[in-house]
Structure formats: C-alpha cells, structure tokens
Image (tube, coloured by chain):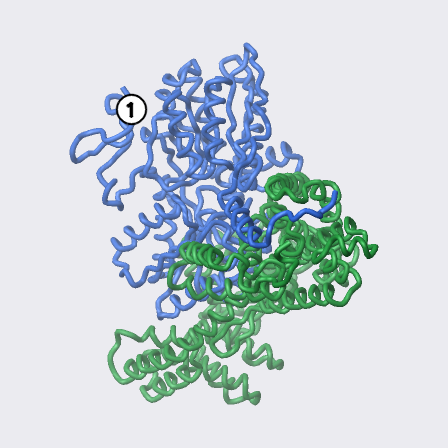
Amino acid sequence: MSLDEPIISRRGLGRLGVAAATIAAVGAVKAATSPAEAQTSGGTIKVGILHSLSGTMAISETTLKDVMLMLIEQQNKKGGLLGKKLEAVVVDPASNWPLFAEKARQLLSVDKVAAVFGCWTSVSRKSVLPVFEELNGILFYPVQYEGQECSRNVFYTGAAPNQQAIPAVDYLMKESKVKRWVLAGTDYVYPRTTNQILEAYLKLKGVAQEDIMINYTPFGQSDWQNIVSSIKKFGSAGKKTAVVSTINGDANVPFYKELGNQGIKATDIPVVAFSVGEEELAGVDTKPLLGHLAAWNYFESVDTKENKAFIKDWKAFTKNPKRTTNDPMEAHYIGFNMWVKGVEKAGTTDPDAVIDALIGVSVPNLSGGYSALMSNHHITKPVLIGEIQADGQFNIVSETPGLVVAQEWSPYVEDTKDLIGDWRAPLKCGAFNVKTGTCTAGKKA
Amino acid sequence: MHRLIAPLLLVILVLAGWGARADGIDDAYDALSASALTISPASFDSVRHGVEQLAVSGDPRAAVVIGALHDGMLYANDDHALFVQQPDGTYVDARTGAAAPDVTDDDVKAVRVNNAVRGAIDGALGILQLFSPDSPVRLEAASAVFTSHDPAALPALDKALAKETDPAVKRRIEQARAAALLSAPDASQADRLAAVATLRDRGDQDSRSLLSALAGQTGPVADAASAAVVSIDRVLQIWSIAESVYYGISLGSVLLLAAAGLAITFGVMGVINMAHGEMVMIGAYVTFVVQQLMHAYLPSLYGISLLIAVPMAFLVSGLIGVAVERSLIRWLYGRPLETLLATWGLSLVLQQVVRSLFGANNRDVDTPGWMSGAYQLGGLTLTWNRMYIILFAFLVVAALMAALRYTPLGLRMRAVTQNRRMAAAMGIRTPWIDALTFGLGSGVAGIAGVALSQIDNVSPNLGQGYIIDSFMVVVFGGVGNLWGTTLGALTLGIVNKFLEPIAGAVLAKIVVLVLLILFVQRNPRGMFPLKGRAVEA
C-alpha cells in the first residue's frame, strides 16, 4: 500500500476534523449487543430486565440486572409464582435512549413478558413510556427521580423529590443552620426539575433570591476549578452555605476532588448529593469526601436483620465479598416482592388485573419497616441522611420518624400544585386537577 | 476475682472524680456518649457540647479522648461509660486510661459524629494543640481555631499568644483571636475594632466571611467591618482575574496533553483516529495496574508509582498503536471516511474490552501526597495536582518536539510526511515509519492518560470526553503543527474559563464550539497553517 496519491488536502483535513468531532459529539450510534435470551416455553412466567449492560450507564445498571437475577432465582427456589417458574429475559439497551424503546417493544410484543424491571435515567424512562402505555405493559422503575409523572403502566419504586430532596434540605436547614444554597446539577431533566422544585421550596421557606445560586454543568464535567472557586466565593458571605448536588454519577468524583484540593471541608460547606451511593463510591478515594452527605431511602449500613440477610445473599450470589448494595437495589427488592404479591393477589399475570391488584400491596423494606404501594403508583419510604465515611459507607445521621408518602406532582410548582394521581376506581387518572375537577392527562377507561 | 475488682475500682474512681473535679468534666464525659446510643439531633448536640466543654476543662485526658473521637475510636456502653479502642483492638477506660479487659466489641457502640461535631472536634483539638512544641502543629492548631472561631477559646489563645515566639504562628494566633473576638458580643469595642483590622489585613475569603457575618448590626464595629469587606472585595476582584487565567492555563494544559498525541497521528499523518481517546484511557488503566502491582510488590516505592507509570503507559499504548496501524489503519490510507468509521468502531471495541477486563466501575487511582492540596499565593489557590499537570504537559510537548527535531526517527518521520517518494528513494522503509509514527502518537496519548487519571475518573468512558476537545485543539491550532497545538490548547482553555462564569459551563462550551466553527470557516488551516509545497500535495 503506498501513499503516493494525495489523500486529501490539508485544507480538507481541518474540515474533516470538525466533522469527526461532530460525529463524536452526536455520537452514541451503538449497536445492541445481546439479543434476548428468551425461548418460548410453556410453563414459565417471563420477567423482562431492561438495564444497560454496556455504554455509559453500565456502571450503575449492571448491578440492577444482577440483583433482579438474584431475586428471580430466590423466588424460583421458593417454588416460583402461581405454580410456574420465573424466567428472566435480559436485554441490553446499551445506554442508548431510543434503543430502550425498541428493546421495551421487543420484551412486550415478542417475548410477552409479564412485567419489566428497568431503566435508570429519566430520559430512558421517558423513551419507553409510550411503548408501555401503548402495549399495556408493566414497568417497575427503581431510581429516585424528579417526579411530575404518574403513568398507569409504571410503578415508581424510587423516591419522588419529597422523599429525598426536600427532607435533605430540611435537615441542612435545621441541623446545620444553612442560610445560603448552591443548587448544582448536571444539565438534564432530573436536576432541572428537582432544582425548580427546590428553588420554589426554599423561597417558600423565606430564603432570598440572592442566597440561591444555581449552576448547571455538562455531562461528564471534569474541570471544576472555577465552579468550586465560585462556590467558595458564594460561601464567604458570612452565612452558612451548603451545596445541593444533583450532579450525575461520573462527574462527581472530580467535583469532590476539587473541593478537597481547594481546602473546602464538609464542616465548612457541606455537599448533599442525590446521586452518590455506595456503588459510586466503590473505586473512589474517599478522603476528600469525608463528611459530605447523601440522602437516600436505604444505605448499606442500615442496621437491621433484613438488610444483613440481603447483603449476605447478595455477596453469595455475586461470589464477590466486596460487592456493595445501594438504594436502587432496595427499590428493585421492594418492587419485585410487590409484583409477586400483586400477581398472587390477582391470581393471574394479566396486566390489567395485576395493575389493579398492586395498589395497596405492602411488603417489608430493608430498613426495618413496610413499604406500601399507593394509588399514585409510588411507594412509601423512610428518608435517611448519611455522611460519607472513610470506608465508603454512610454514617446515618438522620432518619425520618415515619414513612413518607410520595408526592408525584410537586405542590411547590405552580403548574402542578393542584394535580394528584389516583389509579383506583372511580378516579383512574394520572393527573387529576382537584380545583377544576377534571382529569388533565393519562385517563384510562 | 479480677472481674469483681475492675467495676469496683471504676466506681471508686468515678466517685473520686466526682469529689475532686468540677461537675463540668463529668457532664462533658456524660454528654459525649449520647450519639452512640441514639441517633437524633439532640444526641449530636450533646456530643458537640461535650467536646467543647472538655476542650476547655483542663482535663489531662481531653486530648486523648477527643483525638479518639476524631479517629472514630471512641466507644460507649449502655451505661454511658466511655472506652477508647486501642490499635490492637482492646479497650481502655476513656476517663482514666486504665485497661478495660472485660469490654468486648459486643458491649460497646461507636460514638457517632456528624459535621457539627466534627467541626467542634477540629476546634477543640486546635485549642489543645496550641501549646504543642512543634511550630507546624501550632500553626495548624491556630488555623483550626480560626475556623471554629469559638469565643470559649479566648483564654487559651491569650495564653498561647503570650508564649509564642515563632512570628508566623504568632500572626495566625492573632488572627484566630480576632475571629473569636468578633463572635464574642461581650468583648470590648476597642478589642473588636482591632479584630476587624486584623482580619482586613488577612484579606482572604474566610476573613470576608467572618466580617460580613456582622452585616445587619449597627455601631462602629459593624461599620468598620463593612468597610473592611469592601476593601477585601476590591483586592479579591483583581485576584479573580489572575485566577481565571490560571484556570484557563490549567484547562489548556489538559487539552494539550490529550491533543499532543493526536497532533502526531492526525496532524502529521492525516489519520482521523477516533480511537485516540481510548489510547488515553488505556494509559490511565496502565497507571491503575502499575499502582496495584507496586502496592503488592514494591510498597516502599509506592509514592513514585506515577513516575513509573509514565514510561509503562507510553509503551503499552504505543505498542497497541503500532498493532492497530499494522492491522487496521494501513489498509485504509487514502480513505478518510472509512478510517473514521473503522477507528470509531475500534474505539467501541476497546472500551468494551476494558469494561470486560476491569468492570464497568471506576477504578481508584491514588493521588500521591505530594500532588494533593493547594498552595496559597495571595488570593490565588493553586492546587498542586493542576500545577504538576501544567508542568507535565509542557514537558511532554517539549520532549515530543525534541524527538521530532533531533532524533533519527524524528528526521525520518518528517522526511516521510514531507515527501514520501523521495524518502522511500533514500532507503527509508516508509511503512515502518508510518507504524512508528502512529505508535508515537498513541504512546503520547497513553502518557496523557497517566495525568488524566489524577483529575478524572478512570473508567472505560474516560477517552470519550476528550476526543472532541482534542480534535478541536488540533484543527484550531493548525494541522501538523505542535506549536499551533500548544497555543490552540491554551487559547481554548483560557477563552473557556473566561466565558464560564459569564455564560455558565454548558453555554460556554457551545459558544466555544460555534466560535471555532466560524474560525475554521475563515481559516481552514487553523491558526498556524503549514507552508510549503508539501502542504498542497
């Protein structure tokens, strides 16, 4: 092979370089890897697992696939469900949002699964939502999210903002006497909606506009120097300052590192995060994170019998004594047990019957209580606040005395303050306006 | 026998303590155990009060007990008795220091701390260490008291100030005293005015924070404080410009590192290598492996593991680069679109290979002690890791330029890129030069990975974040020109950092990209286009 002919002029190279960069930026044209591992067999109930096993989100979602496999295996050991064995159908949407919808369609129409457990990011949930509504499937969504949604076909086992963000802000306001707030987030739907709710809530609590600083960064931000420096400046106004972080997974580590390097300790400006859990802290140098906070509904360090048994099973199942557990795993644990109970109650896996049977089902959670599935398709949860310890676990410093009921539509946002979701007869509406008495969206006869 | 005596002794000791000492110490010890038994805001408050009381009580065990609490070694049993766990796992009684052989792990629970307690502990340890014989410890201690600015520390500060001989420590103690005075409303006005002056002279953000806390009050002290805030702000304003420049250079150096290898493979060879970021990622993983191996086999040299990782990363990424060139890219010369797609596919393959080998989770690469923390230059916080990366980036580029200019390989590379036929006629094996050039570019990318492992996540996605920026830098600076790449990286970094505070991080990136596209429209060959006949070939 010779290079005698001119390939392309240098002029063109510059343009091509920009084109290459643009392709990378638009990116994410990734092929799906594994086809469904499903075969049709008569005596089984199929359960779909829709979590990314490759791509950016694999870091968080692979664990959830594993925990589902464990729960299904345990249920089969107990004799299955309705006298049939459960069969997991694992698909890989590869962190590619449109592919989530395709894979969901495949699970529901080709594999005919009875229920799907899956999704992590809100954008993936929004992508599959029309598919589940069209094909009348059941989705269990295990991750804390921004709320403002209530679909008949989705069961939200993660926290709504009032089950995570608002109690965390209350804690800082009360215990740390925080007067000034930095709302820092990655630029996408979850942080934007959460911060919108928090901003309204803080103002309601008498925080002035100049005491709130909102900052958004792109996905995967790694250079936090001047953002941390401006947080430091913002914090030098003589009032106790805290950062409420909705920064997404990967960008967190450089953020905390920069805080540590610029000498900001948790005792000066605490950071409370909603997306940092045990899984994210594994493989991270926790020195600069010490004392920073996270709000969740579950921590691996929860000291209960149920949790100890769960951790033991998990380590045995993964054959890895170092595997951690985290909040979305607990959500799947609760969601799966709820679905099992709902199917038993309905006596069938028919979606309409199960959706109706699920409301009111109550199962033990891992923090020593019971979580109930409410008529808004969200579950009741305790809210825990933990400080990061040197070993990457959380030291629980606050726990709500009782369970918190999810507010699917935020009362702090003007557009949604009059809405409620109630999927029981006779209302059967995902967004019912209590002022006007009309169902604004999601009506299902 | 022994079992009986120990509790008895304890009772006697406790009773003796009761008689001999002030009630304050007993209360302090009692308060300390609260958060071991129940977690509530009140129990943490109690521990905090306990720490504060104990620090100023003059109790000889105070430093040990508070130190144990700081290290998470303080335990309490159901009867509120406190024990300190020793490094060997046994317990001693916290109040007396006597061994407590009967206590086992099951009897006691750790006293929990939260941020408020941690702050109190730092302040308390600061007070206790003000009298340490080492001046660096005293300096640390004075800084801790400054941060906690607890008026209760005033007597200790006065005493320490009278004894202090080291001028730097003395100044810091004066500042700590000023901070405490400002929080003490019953201090005399003269004292408080002097305190305001001391803090104004210190002039940093912490002082500003303390002074502006007085806002809203009236009287001469508050007036002096608000005047001081204004004067501090004026100084900080100037520093913030210097800060933006520094951050820009720092970002630019990271871009430069990531782009230096691409300046060779794309700039010199004209190969659109979309897998360039993955070579960076592999370099970061080599750093991780080197650290793990050294941790296991050469713990004495662990501190310099990064230095050893540099040549290793160069070799591994470089060899992979040579292999890629020989097996894939050489078949695609002259077909840029196919090269783009093939290397894009290769990047996905490499990511998934790494994900399968090391798992999808981030890997923990330690930052050595000499790279953590920051150097305070006036109002400028210069973080060590960034400073080393700036230095490292320029060293890498200098070495690369020297290699191209002064080594036989560099000579051949330049010959081949300038006139391939002539070079071949002179007996240069041009295919091998192509392979080595690509290997060099990939190896430099690997070196960049070592540096990036210090500031970014070591994950399979590491490279993706840099590929766009790298292409931008090379195109902007002028394809095939290392000087252009250097200046391009620095310009993009500084422009980005000046835009960020105004426009926000997201918009700043977009604005930079739009400006770049406009620039390339006008100057398709970048800032420093290559001149000469070879260019038009």
Question: Image quadrant for the N terminus of chain B?
Answer: bottom right
Which chain has been coloured green in this picture?
Answer: B
Question: Label 1, on which residue?
Answer: A424
Give the left or right position of residue B376, taking residue A355 as reference.
right
Q: Residue at x 41, y 76 (%)?
A: B236
The quarter holding residue A231 reads bottom left
> Image height check: is A252 above or below A128?
below
Q: Give the secondary structure at mark 1.
A: loop
What type is the residue that disc 1 sits on? Arg
Chain letter of disc 1 in the image: A
The residue sitting at the left extreme is A436
Q: Position of residue B480 (x, y in %)?
A: 63, 59
User: For residue A189, which quarter of the picture?
Assistant: top left
Note whether A226 is above or below B109 in the view shown. Answer: below
Residue at x 33% of width, y 73% of height:
B213
Query: Which quarter of the image is occupied by the C terminus of chain B?
Result: bottom right
Q: Return the residue nearer the eye: A174 or B228.
A: B228
Q: Horizontally, is B500 left or right of B250 in the view?
A: left
Out of B167 and B236, give the one closest to the viewer.
B236
Crowd band around label 1 with a 10 angstrom C-alpha radius: few (<14), some (14–19), many (20+): some
Chain shown blue: that is A
Above/below status of B63 relative to B481? below
